[in-house]
Image: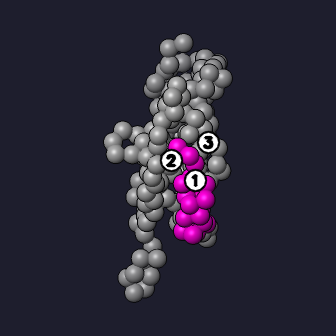
Amino acid sequence: MKKNNDILTSLENDAHLTPEMLAVMYDKEVGDIKKMIEDYERDGVILGYKTLIDWDKTDREYVSAMIELKITPQRDRGFDRVAEKIYNYPEVQSLYLMSGSFDLAVMIEGKTMREVAYFVAQKLAPLEDIVSTATHFVLRKYKDKGVIYGPAEVDERGNMI
């Protein structure tokens, strides 16, 4: 089935778009749009629907970190076996195979820096195929998944909160 990239892009940018809205936008029948979406979901083209939240504007305490991993690839499996172990940890938000000076980039979230450090030291570093790790804590998000975050809150003294 040929993918309609315009419809997919529209849904990626705004998951609130209804089949009726998409039908008007792309001059198609509502039933055809519904069928396309069902097919995309069944075929694994559409993997899910998410809401992007600026958690810094809530009372939720969390820390995000990117962890670079150097790995010894496995014969006949490359990086896949190690990646499977890593992406099954609930702390792992994203996992990417990279080119460059490290092999995998892991994005995780924890409640504190200590919790993230514990995850790296107790769960990632001991994996037999991990050669080295480097942890980078996210200090502020400016843009994520194409969405620009608002300005940081400033207190009455002009200090970022």
Q: In front here: 123 or 17?
A: 123
Q: Residue at x 49, y 20 (%)?
A: 4
Left or right of 152 in this view: 54: right
Seen in the image, is 119 located left or right of residue 73? right
Residue 146's x, y, as percent? 42, 46
Is residue 154 magenta-colored? no
| Mark 1 in CB contact with mark 2 (< 8 angstroms) | yes
Q: Quadrant of residue 152?
A: bottom left
Which numbered tag is attached to residue 130?
A: 2
Closest to the camera, between mark 3 and mark 1, is 1
Q: Disc 2 and disc 3: Cα gap in Å? A: 11 Å
Residue 123 appears in the rendering: yes
Name the amino acid type tagged 2.
Answer: Ile
| Residue lying furthest top | 1
SS class of the residue under badge 2?
Answer: strand
**What residue did someone put label 3 on?**
85
Label 1 amino acid? Pro
16, above or below 32, in the image: below
In the image, which residues are magenta? 109-130
Q: Who comes first in sequence, dot 3 or dot 1?
A: 3
Residue picked out by circle 1:
126
Question: Which badge, 2 or 3, comes first in the chain's sequence?
Answer: 3
Q: Callout 1: helix, strand or loop? A: loop
